[in-house]
Image: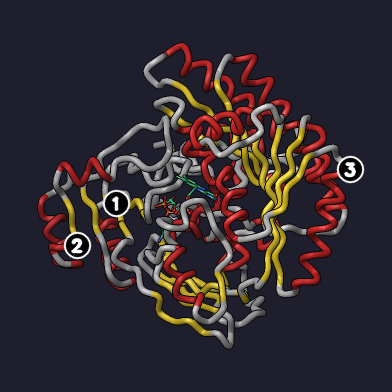
Amino acid sequence: MLDKTIIEKLEMLVGKENVLTSKVDMVAYSYDATADMPHQLPDVVVMPTSSEMVQQIVHLARANKIAIYPRGAGSNLSGGTIPLKKGIVLSFQRMNKILDIDPANLTAVVQPGVVIAALNSAVAEFGLIYPPDPGTVATATMGGSAAENSGGLRGLKYGVTKNYIMGMEVVLANGEKVRFGGKTVKNVTAYDFSNLFVGSEGTLGITTELTCKLIPAPKYRRTMIGIFSTLEDAGNAVAGIIAAQVIPATLEIMDNKTIRTVEAFANIGLPVEAKAMLLCEVDGMSQDLIATEAEAVIEVFKKNNCEYKTANSDVERDQLWAARRNALPALASLNNTCIVEDATVPRSRITEMLVACEKIATKHNVTIGTFGHAGDGNLHPTILYDMYDKAETARVHEAIDEIFATALALDGTLSGEHGIGMAKMKYLGNELGQSGLNLMKCIKESLDPEYMLNPGKMVPLKEV
Ligand SMILES: Cc1cc2nc3c(=O)[nH]c(=O)nc-3n(C[C@H](O)[C@H](O)[C@H](O)COP(=O)(O)OP(=O)(O)OC[C@H]3O[C@@H](n4cnc5c(N)ncnc54)[C@H](O)[C@@H]3O)c2cc1C
């Protein structure tokens, strides 16, 4: 419980209307979108409206040894915003202005609370897009998605958030404000600070402004689905499309469990006997080029024994996309708890990973539907269970341990896009080794020696 005088000082710094303390509000900020995580009430939620306010809050927190938990929309899937050590939740919902759109430099400057979809709506009138598109574009913020280094459906061709952050303003744990990068396409001045802070999950500094790269919106697209009777054929088709030198904007996969569940949920005529479905979309500026790419994709589909369908209109495209859009809501409706993992493997090993997920589900007697960004090797094994059933919960945790062990054994990684947060901290040493953990600790402690920023996330808490 924070001293009343601290709350009063916070109210003086940001205005009473930007400080929340009621029990109801604290409950609302005690959890995020991650299932199976402990909930913790913060002491206070503060909503600054300027970077100067953020600096002053940091100074106050530092002087009084109070933890700060930065928060965007709370849509992360790794427990990244849970205020484990209570203290201050620093919510960016009122720092949500688009400060500049510059079509000549193909850049935008935004405050961290800007929602990704709002940026895309604003730049659309210039014929531009900001490509990173996590499934939560309509709610996730630029600050939160930069701190997670979010990916999404278009990652294969267009990359992830780190490829689009050109500069930042960050408030450090000592209260200093630092600016780096900017509108220049080239910038090799000093260390690559953007790549240090992007993906740092609020543990190294607090982002108060972002300069991001925009690109011209693709004019044409073609969408296809392939329906496969073996996982091997689907996996080979993924590799075959890339080997044919086509880089689709989207190349998504759904396994049989997901197909069946979506069909039961949405009744859209999916082939429930299929072992896997691929959804592939090519896009670009030239109609001829995307026609050629679409033909190449179909050739690969044919060679890999699949039935395929191409959308001939936007309505048909929406129908093809409906299956993928419904994947998570359909799976989530199966039980009271839904854990979405993002174990990621080199794309050449996607078949092995899909087969392993099926075997792990059978071995531990748990329900797993797997879908995801096949072109990136980024799968979302999604585990559905009853959290009130202790025996089932224990089996789920064993299955998750095995999913990550398998991804690492296949030369993969613990996270393709959801980050580490609290959820995957215990596995970090398996990927990085002790020397990697030491390096993380060294970076954390040089920037935040008191573990004031998002303590308990990514880097284990300091032993005292
Ligand atoms: C249904 C669903 C689908 C999803 N699909 C995808 C997907 O396809 N791809 C993908 O990559 N992710 C996906 N996600 C995860 C999530 O949407 C992304 O990580 C999202 O971009 C997080 O944004 P946010 O504003 O909610 O951040 P939050 O959850 O609020 O915060 C995320 C992290 O950023 C830190 N943070 C927030 N703001 C700041 C700041 N200003 N400065 C410093 N640190 C800050 C927080 O402390 C936390 O560690 C999905 C989540 C859900 C629930």
Identity of the residue drawn at 55% across and 30% down: 261
Point out residue 87 in the picture as x, y percentages from the top left corner: 26, 47
Q: Residues within 10 Å of mark 1 (few under 14, many from 20)?
A: many
Identity of the residue drawn at 16% across and 49% down: 21
**Distance (Cα) linking label 3 and label 1:** 54 Å
Q: Secondary structure at mark 2?
A: helix
The quadrant of the image that shows the N terminus is top left
Point out residue 183 in the picture as x, y percentages from the top left corner: 56, 81
Q: Residues within 10 Å of mark 3 (few under 14, many from 20)?
A: few
Whether 455 is drawn above or below 125: the answer is above
Q: Amino acid at mark 3?
A: Lys
Whether 275 is drawn above or below 54: the answer is above
Farthest residue, direction top: 391
Whether 204 is drawn above or below 214: the answer is above
List the residue tagged with mark 1.
89
Farthest residue, direction bottom: 104
Point out residue 76 in the picture as x, y percentages from the top left corner: 45, 47
